[in-house]
Amino acid sequence: MADTLKWNVFSVILLCAAPMGYGLCKCEKESNTMLKFIRSRGSIDAGLPFSDAVRVGDIMFFSGSLGNVPGKMEIVPGGIEAETRQMFDNIARALEQNGLSFDDVFKCQVFLADMKEWPAFNKIYVEYFKADRLPARSALGVNGLALGARIEMEITAYAGHK
């Protein structure tokens, strides 16, 4: 009897908490307003099978960026330094299109084709972030990247003020 009563009380808590916004469940209408898939014309035209970014509430998750020539499926020549600068230019454009800047980025995940190039990447990386606003970051060595790139980076940004 006591176990049944516990489960009934728990069920009532779940039923009451959800409409009050405690995040235990969301109705479809609420979820759709909290979740937005963002695809650029360039990604659509190129037939890329992913979103450029996804906004979940106040957080934006951006797909990985490469040092590719804008609008083309080719990596800029010049090695890790040139690719890194182009990658940051591509990220800056994606941020700007969503009313954001590097000041809004709070997490980066970096993928390097060769971890020996990590110092060269870091030298350029710090040029794009303020010293007191360095995002949390992970850096991973990988076996290969799209288009033969040397570097790829995913970012997560706060968009609650936009």
Image (spheres, rainbow, N blue to C red):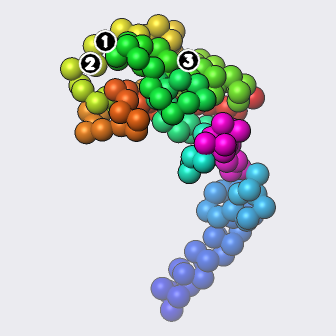
Q: Is residue 39 above or below residue 162?
A: below
Along the line of sight, the residue nearer the viewer: 120 or 32: 120
| First to last magenta residue range | 34-46
Q: Earlier in the sequence, mark 1 or mark 3?
A: 3
**Residue farthest left in this picture:** 116
- Callout 2 crowding tier (Cα within 10 Å): few <14, some 14–19, many ≥20: some
Residue 13 lies left or right of residue 147; in this view the side is right
CA distance separating discs 2 and 3 = 19 Å
The percent position of residue 84, horizontal first and vertical second, equals: 42, 18
At a point 66% along the width and 43% down the height, the residue shown is 45
The percent position of residue 118, horizontal first and vertical second, equals: 28, 19
Q: Earlier in the sequence, mark 2 or mark 3?
A: 3
The percent position of residue 46, horizontal first and vertical second, equals: 61, 42
Could you tell me which quadrant the C terminus lies in?
top right
**Residue type at the position of mark 3:** Asp
**Residue type at the position of mark 1:** Ala
Q: Determine which of the numbered discs, if any, sits on residue 120 in the image.
A: 1
Secondary structure of the residue carrying tag 3 is helix
The percent position of residue 55, horizontal first and vertical second, equals: 65, 42
Residue 37 counted in the magenta span: yes
CA distance separating discs 2 and 1 = 5 Å
Q: Which residue is mark 2?
A: 117
Q: Quadrant of residue 13?
A: bottom right
